[in-house]
Image (cartoon, rainbow, N blue to C red):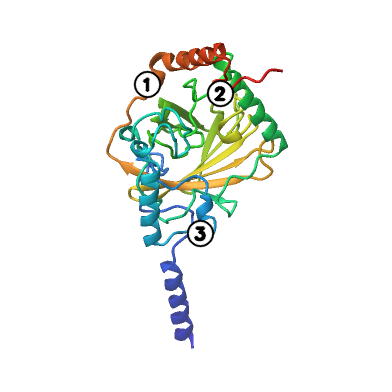
Amino acid sequence: MKNSVLALFSFLIGGFSLAPVVTGQQADIPRTENGHPDFQGTYTYRTITPLNRPRELEHLEVLTAEQAMEWEEFELRRQNRDLIIDSVGGAGYPPGVISYNNFWYERGENTVADRRTSLIYDPPNGRLPALNETGRERAQVRAENRRLSIGPEGRTLADRCLMSGGAGPPIVPGAYNNNIQIVQTKDHIMILSEMIHRARIIRFDDEHQTRHTKWDGDAIARFEGDTLVINTRHFYYHDNGRGASDQMILEERIRRVDETTLEYDFTIEDPLSWDRPWSAKFPLRFINDPVYEYACHEGNHGLAGILAGWRRYESMGMNGNGTPIEED
């Protein structure tokens, strides 16, 4: 009997010794000298999958492999600037001059690997929530400022080469320059966006500071197991990308999926813009290419041209978009 009990006990101990200890950490991923996951490198996040689920795909959360190939072919043709007639417009451009030709675009040619029809996964319909009343009022002011374009401050941060919706925060795939470089130290992590050539220097900390507010907010980072969590708030500007206010709270989560892929997942909460949070995610894929310098407007000549064009239209009795100025 004694030997049977000892045998059973040995079996149980042996069984337990074979079970992995769950710590929230992966043993076989690259790590820095501080023991944290090593995310350093250059990555691309270009994809043809849109942020918002297209209306024509509203009942499809995920595409089949065949549907994905058809969608990719359709979108590449629809967005090809060389196939758009200037006088007609298309792909979001009104009739008139259609920016660059297709050579300059780097939007990606494929859907994300899991073939989702939108980068947004919450709300479940894959689309940005509607702006609430406060958000709509701020959007109207923004539109009026752009219509008047009295000076540089009346234009968007992108027009002024200060920020870009694609460069973040948060990062969102766009038409070109969809590349970032990540550098880590013991106390900081740096994310350099090729778009606008903006460097976010994020400290590992538990508390935010408000002494000096910045365009891209105050960002602090921590590790939860092997997931990097970045919390950003206290944005300087009252009108950030996609309608967010200076009260936006952004949480970004980055984790390793495999040897060459990271997952970037973010959630935005902003009661001055939306009545509920929303979230999106997509892969960051390792590349050997460097991040190139992005010379926005090359000394802001473009901004001077925008304002000069607006003044010219005004002298002709028109708004900057070519519509007649309405008399009060």
Considering depth in this image, is 236 or 117 the residue closer to the camera?
Answer: 117
Toward the bottom, the furthest residue is: 1
Q: Earlier in the sequence, mark 2 or mark 3?
A: 3
Secondary structure at badge 3 equals loop
Q: Nearer the viewer, mark 2 or mark 1?
A: 1
**Measured from the top left, where is residue 93 in percent x and y?**
46, 34
Q: Nearer the viewer, mark 1 or mark 3?
A: 3
Q: Are marks 2 and 3 in contact (CB under 8 Å)?
A: no
Per the image, the residue denoted by label 1 is 295
Give the residue drawn at x 62%, y 26%.
Answer: 142
Q: How many neighbours does mark 1 have within 10 angstroms: few (below 14), some (14-19), or many (20 or more)? A: few
**Measured from the top left, where is residue 28 in percent x and y?**
35, 53
Give the residue drawn at x 46%, y 69%.
Answer: 16
Q: Earlier in the sequence, mark 2 or mark 1?
A: 2
Q: Which mark is residue 26?
A: none
Q: What amino acid does circle 1 point to?
A: Ala
Q: Quadrant of residue 209?
A: top right
**Measured from the top left, where is residue 49 in percent x and y?**
44, 48
The C terminus, quarter of image: top right
Q: What amino acid does circle 3 point to?
A: Leu
Give the residue drawn at x 58%, y 55%.
Answer: 124
Q: CA distance from mark 1 to mark 3?
A: 39 Å
Q: Quadrant of residue 215?
A: top right
Per the image, the residue denoted by label 3 is 60
| 15 in relation to 221, above or below | below
Q: What amino acid does circle 2 point to?
A: Lys
Toward the left, the furthest residue is: 288
Per the image, the residue denoted by label 2 is 214
**Measured from the top left, where is residue 182 in percent x and y?**
39, 35
Q: Earlier in the sequence, mark 1 or mark 3?
A: 3
